[in-house]
Image: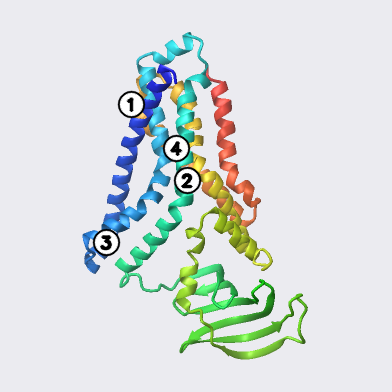
Amino acid sequence: MRILDRYVTKSMVFTFLGCIFIFLFLYVIVDLFSHLDDVLKEKVVIAALLNYYLSFLPLMFIQVAPMACLLSLLYSIGNLSKSNEIIAMRSSGLSIWRISLPALAFGLIVSSFVFMLNERFLPKAQSINYQLKNEMFKKSSSPENKFIYNLAVYGQDNKQFFIDIYHSKEQMMQNVVILEHDENQNVISKTTAKEAYFKKNRWLFRDCIMSYYDKDGRPLGEPFYFKNKIMYLNDRPRDFVNQQQKAMFMNIPQLNDYIKRLSNSGATAVLRNLKVDLYNRFTLPFTSLVIILVGIPFALGKSKRDQAVASLGLCIGISFLYYVFNQTSIAFGKLGVIPPVISAILSHAFFIIFSVIAIKNLP
């Protein structure tokens, strides 16, 4: 590694670590004060809070890493520009890409670390964090009257539930489909109902149709219709609320396997949302690299006089634009406006193209 590369990389590493420490500290403080009433009300002990925020660290790091990378780039390049070192580098024949190489390599390392963290630690950490939060705030987190749309759940006894709307407070399902599988994952029965209520440890299904199939998928006789049908299932209302978080606690292979199992269910909206989440798992970790690439033309194009305030302003502005564009793309993918794979890469592709054009137009 050249002296120049070590010089730029060292500056970026120390600035990045400082930014990460400050951002994580502020993140914890803001989150703690937002839950302060619940903490005091439930008399949460210090040890429980410490475990809660330790399990929160992987998610916090993943969220703040792109902004820390961008700020470290702007600060480091700004210092070089302030001391006229950028001019000296350009005068010696170094191109913009060669000067930016240490920053891009640093972004790639951070992105790779985020990818590893996202796959190996984040799912388990989120599961622990979710459990700790429920335990700490169990009195204040009683079931709300909320609706869960397009819910797909793998229940007990090899059953799949597909629910259009689930009412958590009323413990009621609307437009529910239950597929029962054998040990070879062949559908052996299908139950559809307009509504289902949980009362006295049993489910009451209304306008219920039950069909049975052989191992080749052929129907066994005519479907059975019931105006009201009582069923004793091992799945309880709390299971459906908990299963809503299931995809969050999966890594890429687990999520991919989950999608394959649902592929023949006909739950189009659920599958589309899961595919968007899956493709986003591949692209999201490389946000740090893309953000650094976006910041290069701004960092090298600034005059040394506006370095102080402009670095922070550019950092906030670029991060905000990227976040809005990315979330809009993801939303369009989940709505079916654009294909899931396009929704996951669209924001990255747009900002990469913009950055390459901006860098080429630098003097």
Q: Earlier in the sequence, mark 3 or mark 4?
A: 3
Tag 1: Cα neighbours inside 10 Å, few (<14), some, or many (≥20)? few
Q: Amino acid at mark 1?
A: Ala
**SS at badge 4:** helix
The reply to whether discs 1 and 2 touch (Cβ–Cβ < 8 Å) is no
- Measured in 3D between alpha carbons, the distance from the residue under mark 3 to the one under mark 4, in whole angstroms, is 30 Å
Tag 4: Cα neighbours inside 10 Å, few (<14), some, or many (≥20)? many
Q: Earlier in the sequence, mark 3 or mark 2?
A: 3
Tag 2: Cα neighbours inside 10 Å, few (<14), some, or many (≥20)? few
Image quarter for residue 138?
A: bottom left
- The x and y percentages for residue 45 are 22, 63
Determine which residue is flagged by label 3.
48
Tag nearer the camera, 1 or 3? 3
Residue visible at 36% across and 24% down in the picture: 307
Determine which residue is flagged by label 2.
116
Please indicate whether residue 212 sits to the left or right of residue 122 in the image.
right
Please indicate whether residue 41 sits to the left or right of residue 151 in the image.
left
**SS at badge 1:** helix
- Measured in 3D between alpha carbons, the distance from the residue under mark 3 to the one under mark 2, in whole angstroms, is 27 Å
Tag nearer the camera, 1 or 2? 2
Give the position of the N terminus as an image quadrant. Answer: top left
**SS at badge 3:** helix
Determine which residue is flagged by label 4.
110
Determine which residue is flagged by label 1.
308
Q: Amino acid at mark 2?
A: Met
Q: Amino acid at mark 3?
A: Ala
